[in-house]
Image (tube, grey):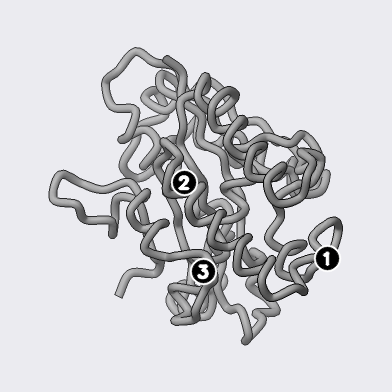
Amino acid sequence: MSKILFLDESGDHNLTAIDPQHPIFVLGGVIADKDYALGEMTEKLNAFKIDLFGTTDIILHTADFTRQRNGFERMKEREFCAAFYEKLNLLISELDIKILACAIKKEHHMEKYGFEAIDPYHLSLNVLVERFCFEIGNSNQTAHIIAEARDATLDRQLDLAWLNLKVSGTRYIQAVNINQKIDSLTTKTKSDKLAGLEIADAIVTPIARRILNRSSRINLEVIKDKMRKNHLGEVTGYGLVVLPKK
């Protein structure tokens, strides 16, 4: 059985001009079996869309539903907005997924490493590839990563970062193991309407807000419950990594 890790981000990876209102970068996503992601998960997301919007054409995108645009104009209505979040929380809680996320506190990252600070996207990618490999374990199943496309330049940089992982590995995973466990990393856009990417988009911003001690309309306990854990139920270091470490 094949697994897919769908990735999206919250915040930007810029370390030269850090936004004091959002001084954090989060790369996160959901792990799901391929057949489930393309089958039942897609069906459940489409049912959610039809229930609320009467169509499957709308794309679940945090920037749109929080800013009440691109088909989400009814979010201005209090009752509709409340129903949307209630049903979205229920949808996430019912999905057969595991959530992974890596958060970079950019100011602290720069304070600790200065000009040697690694790009937050690439650093987060390393961490998530490690956890994805740990999750796959010694099984013979194939695995893939699908990341949200950004622009041509950033996508080329991502291709190079992935190539570097395949050649050099990470601190904890040898390159040969990454190549054995993960077949490919590809990018897709929102318009490709992959349920995994849409759910990944919905969960990364709430994770960022949690780390910044801000509230979220998406239930953070629902997200935590879906995060990858160790045998003791611990999330930190397994489903969620926050860097730099204290």
**How far apart are the two marked residues, 2 and 1, measured between alpha carbons?**
38 Å
User: Is the C-beta separation of discs 3 and 1 under 8 Å?
Assistant: no
| Residue drawn at the location 49% of the way across and 79% of the way down | 215
Say which label, 3 or 2, has the lower sequence index.
2
Say which label, 3 or 1, has the lower sequence index.
1
Query: Which residue extends farthest bottom?
Result: 20
| Residue drawn at the location 54% of the way across and 70% of the way down | 217
Local SS, label 2: helix
Q: Between label 3 and label 1, give the one nearer the viewer.
A: 1
Q: Which residue is mark 3?
A: 208
The amino acid type found where label 1 is placed reads Glu
User: Is the C-beta separation of discs 2 and 1 under 8 Å?
Assistant: no
Q: Is residue 59 left or right of residue 180?
A: right
Q: Which residue is mark 2?
A: 126
The amino acid type found where label 3 is placed reads Ala
Q: Is residue 124 above or below residue 85?
A: above
Picture coordinates of residue 140, whole percent (x, y): 34, 13
The amino acid type found where label 2 is placed reads Asn
Q: Specify the label residue 4 is tagged with.
A: none
Q: Between label 3 and label 2, give the one nearer the viewer.
A: 3
Instruction: Say which quadrant the N terminus sits in.
Output: top left
Q: Is residue 143 left or right of residue 238?
A: right
Q: Between label 2 and label 1, give the one nearer the viewer.
A: 1
Say which label, 2 or 1, has the lower sequence index.
1
Q: Which residue is mark 1?
A: 73
Local SS, label 3: helix
Local SS, label 1: helix
Q: Residues within 10 Å of mark 1 (few under 14, many from 20)?
A: some
Q: Is residue 67 left or right of residue 29?
A: right
